[in-house]
Image (cartoon, rainbow, N blue to C red):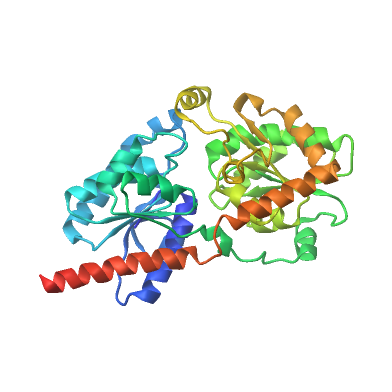
Amino acid sequence: MVAGERSGDVYGAALAEALKKRAANVEIFGCGGEAMRAAGVNTLVDIHQVALIGISEVVSGLPKAYRAMQDLVAEAARCKPAAAILIDSPSLNLSLAKRLKRHNIPVIYFVSPQIWAWKKWRIRKIKACVDRMLCLFDFETEIYEEAGVPVEFVGHPLVDMPAPRMSREEFFMGAGLDPEIPTVAMLPGSRRTEVTFNLPEMLEAAARVARSRRIQFVVACAPTIDSPWLKSLVTRGYHGIAPLHALSNSTHEALQYSAAAVVASGTATIEAAIRECPMVVVYRVSAFTAMCARFMINVPFYSMVNLLAGHAAVPELIQSDFTAARLAVNLERLLDDGEARSRMIDDLRKVKERLGKGGAIGRAADVIVRHLEGAKASLHAG
């Protein structure tokens, strides 16, 4: 089992636990982080060795990631596992799938690469190297069916995310905030590079919004981000008059109890949609990465929320459009325009319906167990 970043580690941990409940004596090794280790996965390679982002940002990390991949392939060739479960991270996992197939190891891919958005040529590699694709989004199945790739829609694991562990009162008291004042949550990303690019404009926008109203802000620190580092960025970068606090381990509560959110494009936008939190989606990468992406991305929207909605349900401020002034204007509209808020919340509810009815991890585990049982039967027959 191989995960290349934080959300994949969380999904991998849940999948490992589900497999152990369904298949006696199953042993899992591979690449993951703390969550997968806690679930009993023998992580020969740590997730930090392979976590890469962007284009220019990837280059310096390639040698380390390549060595990690070689170690995984060598161990797989030695152990001959009944299946390889590769989770998201296509830059890593599609290359890994090709090498694993050379050793006749079946590949089950969980969380489809976004071939509908960019790098559409990857479908040829997927058809050659992947035995079954497990998709989180319903529209992806048609793409794989047309290409002749065995596929199943299992739904999105975030549908089953637990309710906030704190009540509204507990959250505001613990954060040192006033529950009577409107709150804006800010989620700058789950990687240091993302935070470095996204947070400064968020903080400046917060200062602008605070000039004209009573407002307060929370910056939610992702589990993959060093909390003291993020808090130091906030301390140095925020010069507004409204209360603004950086909080750890409070993303669920921040989205649940805030009037609006600013969310870095990615998985967090799906969580915000499930929480029905009105949002502005933002993102910025290096100029070189942005220039390259301009020639590769072929979708009308960047955020998954808008792609699922089929229209601009939430504002997107990407790259040069992402300025503090524009973000402030969009936030003020969300806070002041009740009709716009209601339309957005209605759209988010419709998006949530397209994510499945829950039980995605269990369905994925069932598919994998069927494969394992088939492999076992074939081995006995041989």
List x then y, in percent, for residue 142. 42, 48
Location of residue 146 by image quarter: top left
* Above or below: residue 297 compared with residue 95: above
| 382 versus 280 height, above or below | below
Q: Can residue 217 be seen in this view?
A: no
Query: At 52% from the left edge and 33% from the top edge, which residue is drawn?
Result: 299
Taking the spot 63% from the left edge, 24% from the top edge, the residue there is 320
Q: Is residue 153 visible?
A: yes
Query: Considering depth in this image, is 330 or 239 the residue closer to the camera?
Result: 330
Total numbered labels placed on residues in the image: 0
Coordinates of residue 318 in the picture (x, y in percent): 61, 30
Q: Residue at x 47, y 36 (%)?
A: 117
x, y percent for residue 301: 58, 35
User: Where, quadrant-wise, is the N terminus in this rendering?
Assistant: bottom left
In the image, residue 197 above or below residue 171: above
* Residue at x-position 51% and y-position 26%: 290
Q: Quadrant of the C terminus?
A: bottom left
Asked if residue 63 lies left or right of residue 214, the reply is: left
Q: Position of residue 194 (x, y in %)?
A: 56, 37
Name the residue furthest left: 382
**Closer to the camera in the image, 27 or 277:** 277
